[in-house]
Structures are given as C-alpha cells and as structure tokens.
C-alpha cells in the first residue's frame, strides 16, 4: 500500500548506525559505544534531588494532564534562567515540550512551507534537516571556518528569496564549537537584514570548557529569536524528555508564531507532568553536579584529542558539549566516512558515527566521537582505533 512521501528524507545517522552494531553484538562481540550523547549511560547519574522530586510527584498523584503550554511553575523557572542569560522572555513566551526535538519540530512546523529554505551551519545535528524536509522545505548548509566561526560570506551567498529561517547550534553538535558574542551578533544582523527567523539551540549551554558561554539573548534585541533548550544534558535527564521553546518577547515579528505554536502544543495534549515538577527542582535546586561533570568531561576531551592527533588523525579541541569531530584521510583505503565507521566497528568493536550523517557538504570526511565514557574505556577505544588506522 502507498505511504506518504514525507518520510523519504527523514534520517538520523546517530541511531541508524546502531543497526550495524546490533548485528555485531548478535555475534557475541563487545562494543565500545562512542556514538550516542547520553551521559546517564555512563558515570553521570541523574542528581538525587531531581529523582526525589519525580518520585514525590508520582506518590502524591501528580499524574494527570498538565497545561498544554507547560506547568506554570516550570515556565516561571525557565523565565528566570533564560532572563539571566539575557533573553527578554515572559511566561507567555514559553512552551514546555517533550524534549528539545519536539520543540524543534513545533518551531519548524510553524515556519516551513513547501519549497522554503532553512539555513543551518554545516555540520549540523541531523533532526534539523530531517524536520525541514518532512515539512517540504530545503535545508541549506553554510560553511564554518576551521576555527568554528561562521563563514559570513558563504552564508550571504546562500540566502535567497525562499530563505525562511537561520539555525544556530551553540555549543555545536557534532563539532563542540561555541560561537562567541561577535559571531552571534553578526548572525543576528544578517537574519534581521533578510527578515529571517532565528532558531537557536542552547541545550549544551552549561557544558563549556575554555570560554564563557554567550546566550543568544545577549544580542537578540528585537530579532525574531526562537530559543530551544532543555534538561537532558546539563541536568542528566535524557530519558525523561523535557525541553522548552522560548520566544523573544521584544520581537513583534513573532506575534503570529506566538499564536500558532500553542496550537501545536494543544494538539499533542501536554508534556509529562511529574517530569515537569522535577524539572522545576532541576533549575532551582543544587547545581553542584554541573562543575563536577564539566571537569570530568574536560579531562576526557583532552585525552581523546591528544590521542587522536598523536596517531595522525587531525582533531580540533572542542570548546563545549561532549563530542569530537576528527577528520580522516580517506585515500584509497576507504571510499567514504561511512565505510570507515563500519569497518572500524567490524574490526575493533568501536562504534562512532560517520560525519556525512551530519550533513554531506561539510560533515563528509569526518567521524563523530562521544567522549562520555570513563578514561580507561576511552584509552582502550583509542588503542583500538590507533591499531586500526595503522594496520
């Protein structure tokens, strides 16, 4: 029977590659997982006060439908956090979502029409292009310089009358790069000049190493900024699925968007109430796990990048998140980065993700490594990788 053509462009390389890993595991072989950015699967447990808040909520029968836009107390706490980062936002500008991915889905559903274009930095997180294609639009990658700054000349060349939105992912997945204030200001200026929505993903805002994080709110002024954020990474709540959309209250250009997004929230009923109650405690409770986590990740990042460069694989030092995006020399041995990743898995049991899964134009010839595992596991993975590339 015929099915919709809409799903033909939907891809998610991070999980798609696990199909190969499942075959490998079925043979009884060990896999070292460096493919999915889920800190809770390693030695980063969800903080106790957050878990206790969830258990208490369930025990008190806080198990009914929440408001579609989100729990008022959580929306208030989100406003406190994002206002502190510089965004002009009120509780009416916040929609709580089932993870950042749902927030992205809602935002793009409200913005993208068939044949419209959405600009995104290459490489990018795969759902950005998948959702754009799902709604009939065209993802357009613009280049980043080797130091992680956006190539503004390339971006300007790719803006057309069909351009509808500009996406910013900082800290970036998959590269770990962080846009500085100057770069953010330049992107806002270009978006304002060309009447583009700005969708900014700041899910890794608290996981940075060598520079101070600047939120988009610091430079937004009255630009139509749609901020995405959530609780999965910094608050170690990946499986809980809780995120949010914040709309720049200063932007009158968002008035129609501000009316339409709540309609989508109402159609899907609500976000999980006990998790929202726990998310309030995540924002307002102890934050001491965050610097501990960041310091652990800094050591693991340094280990991985040193080992990669030491074995002849070029890799920049990521400034945020928990990903490295090394370049590989394909030559005659591998036809593309996906073949490299599959052969690495088959030969060593080390599972990574091919760079082209994050955009063919600027991701090809790379692979993504997650440096969440403990240092002894990372050392073992690097030993296997070095033996593989030198064999």
Image (tube, rainbow, N blue to C red):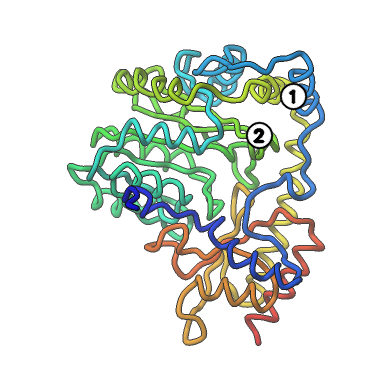
Quadrant of the image occupied by residue 77: top right
Q: Residue at x 46, y 30 (%)?
A: 227
Quadrant of the image occupied by residue 132: top left
Tell whether 308 sits left or right of 219: right
Tell whether 261 sits left or right of 244: left
Crowd band around label 2 with a 10 angstrom C-alpha radius: few (<14), some (14–19), many (20+): some
Total labels drawn: 2
State if disc 2 and disc 1 touch (CB < 8 Å): yes
Q: Earlier in the sequence, mark 1 or mark 2?
A: 1
Crowd band around label 1 with a 10 angstrom C-alpha radius: few (<14), some (14–19), many (20+): many
Q: Residue at x 37, y 63 (%)?
A: 361
Q: Residue at x 63, y 54 (%)?
A: 36
Q: Which residue is mark 2?
A: 240
Question: How far from the left and from the top, in percent, is residue 346?
Answer: 64, 76
Mark 1, secondary structure of its residue: helix
Residue closest to the eye, 29 or 195:
29
Question: How far from the left and from the top, in percent, is residue 327?
Answer: 52, 69
Mark 2, secondary structure of its residue: helix
Residue closest to the eye, 81 or 76:
76
Question: How far from the left and from the top, in percent, is residue 224?
Answer: 34, 27
Q: Residue at x 39, y 20 (%)?
A: 263
Q: Which residue is mark 1?
A: 54
User: Residue 199 — which label?
Assistant: none
Quadrant the C terminus occupies: bottom right
């Amino acid at each position: 029977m015929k099915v919709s053509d809409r799903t033909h462009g939907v891809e998610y390389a991070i999980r798609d590659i696990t199909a190969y890993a499942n075959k490998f595991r079925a043979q009884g072989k060990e896999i070292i997982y460096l493919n999915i950015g889920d800190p809770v699967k390693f030695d980063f447990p969800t903080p106790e006060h957050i878990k206790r808040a969830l258990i208490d909520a369930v025990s008190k029968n806080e198990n009914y439908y929440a408001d579609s836009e989100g729990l008022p107390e959580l929306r208030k706490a989100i406003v406190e956090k994002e206002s502190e980062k510089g965004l002009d936002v009120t509780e009416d500008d916040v929609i709580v979502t089932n993870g950042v991915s749902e927030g992205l889905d809602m935002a793009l559903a409200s913005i993208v029409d068939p044949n419209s274009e959405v600009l995104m930095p290459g490489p990018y997180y795969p759902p950005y292009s998948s959702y754009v294609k799902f709604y009939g639009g065209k993802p357009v990658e613009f280049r980043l310089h080797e130091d992680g700054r956006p190539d503004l000349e390339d971006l300007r060349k790719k803006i057309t009358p069909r351009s509808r939105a500009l996406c910013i992912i900082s800290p970036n997945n998959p590269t770990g790069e962080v846009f500085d204030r100057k770069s953010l200001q330049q992107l806002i200026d270009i978006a304002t000049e060309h009447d583009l929505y700005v969708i900014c993903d700041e899910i890794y805002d608290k996981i940075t190493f060598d520079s101070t994080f600047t939120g988009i709110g610091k430079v937004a002024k009255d630009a139509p900024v749609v901020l995405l954020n959530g609780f999965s990474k910094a608050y170690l709540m990946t499986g809980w699925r809780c995120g949010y959309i914040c709309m720049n209250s200063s932007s009158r250009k968002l008035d129609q968007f501000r009316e339409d997004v709540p309609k989508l929230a109402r159609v899907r009923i609500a976000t999980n109430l006990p998790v929202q109650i726990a998310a309030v405690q995540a924002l307002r409770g102890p934050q001491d796990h965050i610097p501990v986590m960041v310091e652990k990740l800094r050591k693991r990042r340094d280990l991985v990048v040193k080992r990669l460069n030491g074995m002849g694989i070029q890799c920049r030092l990521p400034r945020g998140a928990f990903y490295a995006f090394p370049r590989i020399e394909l030559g005659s041995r591998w036809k593309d980065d996906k073949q490299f990743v599959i052969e690495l898995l088959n030969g060593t049991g080390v599972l990574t993700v091919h760079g082209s899964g994050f955009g063919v134009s600027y991701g090809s010839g790379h692979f993504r490594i997650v440096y969440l595992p403990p240092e002894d596991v990372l050392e073992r993975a690097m030993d296997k990788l070095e033996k593989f590339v030198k064999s």
